[in-house]
Image: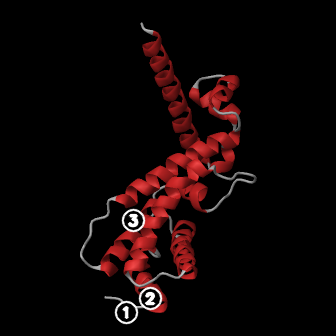
């Protein structure tokens, strides 16, 4: 095996082991919540030693950072390919639905991305970048509906995450709050848009 091939093989093996640890970490937090994740438990569940975990992640926050990055990439991917209906309002509603569906479908992932439940954890700029990209898509849809004020974007994110929080807290798996999306979009645009909704 050539030196280049050996380096490539080692790197691929390292990435596979790291991916396995991350998948195991997600399994743990989906079963028991974000606070339940410990390096010892992760090592046990992954079938490795705690020092092996440290070979891939230098701290628990490094694991959370990698998880945040994966979640943010998924968030960006789910919102990158929304079809254009030809109606700025309908596109805005579709964007809102996709956002809310993404959030309610995986509560620990939503909490990690939008609630900051881990004391002392701040995502790295690299992990955060896909989330910024995803939110830029919402800014585009809002701008097409005549909403350009940064305050109104903040209002938008607060209301959308509020719908998610209500749904998760009060009727997990139901639609009491998520079925309000179109009404909420219409209401927000009526209040914040420089042009009337379609």
Q: Position of residue 91 (x, y in %)?
A: 32, 74
Image quarter hosting the N terminus = top left
Image quarter hosting the C terminus = bottom left
Q: Quadrant of residue 180?
A: bottom left
Q: Position of residue 144 (x, y in %)?
A: 37, 79
Q: Position of residue 84 (x, y in %)?
A: 26, 69
Which one is nearer the viewer's eye here, 186 or 36? 186
Label 2 residue SS: loop
**Does the CB distance between marks 1 and 2 fall below 8 Å?**
yes
Point 42% across, 66% down: residue:
137
Q: How many marks?
A: 3
Q: Which residue carries the number 2 mark?
A: 193
Point 47% across, 66% down: residue:
136
**Does the CB distance between marks 2 and 3 fall below 8 Å?**
no
What whole-number distance in Å separates the C-alpha atoms at marks 1 and 2?
7 Å
Sequence-first tag of 2 and 3:
3
Sequence-first tag of 1 and 3:
3
Q: Quadrant of residue 26?
A: top right
What crowding class fits label 1: few (fewer than 14 Cα within 10 Å), some (14-19), or many (20 or more)?
A: few
Q: Which residue carries the number 3 mark?
A: 98
What whole-number distance in Å separates the C-alpha atoms at marks 2 and 3?
21 Å
Point 44% across, 88% down: residue:
193
Drawn side of residue 143 relative to residue 54, left or right: left
Label 3 residue SS: helix
- Does residue 118 appear in this view? yes
What crowding class fits label 2: few (fewer than 14 Cα within 10 Å), some (14-19), or many (20 or more)?
A: many
Q: Which mark is residue 67?
A: none
Which one is nearer the viewer's eye here, 36 or 162? 162
Q: Which residue carries the number 1 mark?
A: 196
Which one is nearer the viewer's eye here, 186 or 32? 186
Point 46% across, 56% down: residue:
75
159 vs 49: above or below: below
């Amino acid at each position: 095996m050539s030196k280049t091939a050996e380096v490539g093989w080692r790197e691929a093996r390292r990435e596979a082991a790291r991916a396995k640890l991350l998948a195991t970490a997600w399994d743990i937090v989906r079963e028991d919540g974000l606070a339940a994740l410990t390096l010892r438990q992760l090592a046990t569940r992954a079938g490795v030693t705690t020092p092996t975990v440290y070979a891939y992640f230098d701290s628990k926050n490094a694991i959370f950072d990698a998880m945040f990055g994966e979640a943010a990439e998924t968030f960006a991917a789910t919102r990158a390919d929304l079809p254009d209906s030809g109606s700025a309002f309908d596109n805005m509603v579709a964007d809102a639905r996709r956002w809310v569906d993404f959030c309610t479908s995986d509560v620990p992932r939503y909490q990690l991305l939008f609630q900051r439940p881990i004391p002392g954890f701040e995502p790295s700029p690299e992990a955060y970048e896909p989330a910024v990209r995803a939110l830029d898509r919402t800014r585009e849809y809002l701008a097409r509906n005549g909403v350009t004020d940064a305050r109104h974007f903040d209002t938008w994110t607060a209301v959308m995450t509020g719908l998610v929080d209500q749904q998760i807290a009060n009727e997990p798996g139901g639609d009491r709050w998520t079925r309000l999306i179109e009404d909420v979009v219409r209401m927000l645009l009526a209040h914040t848009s420089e042009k009337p909704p379609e």
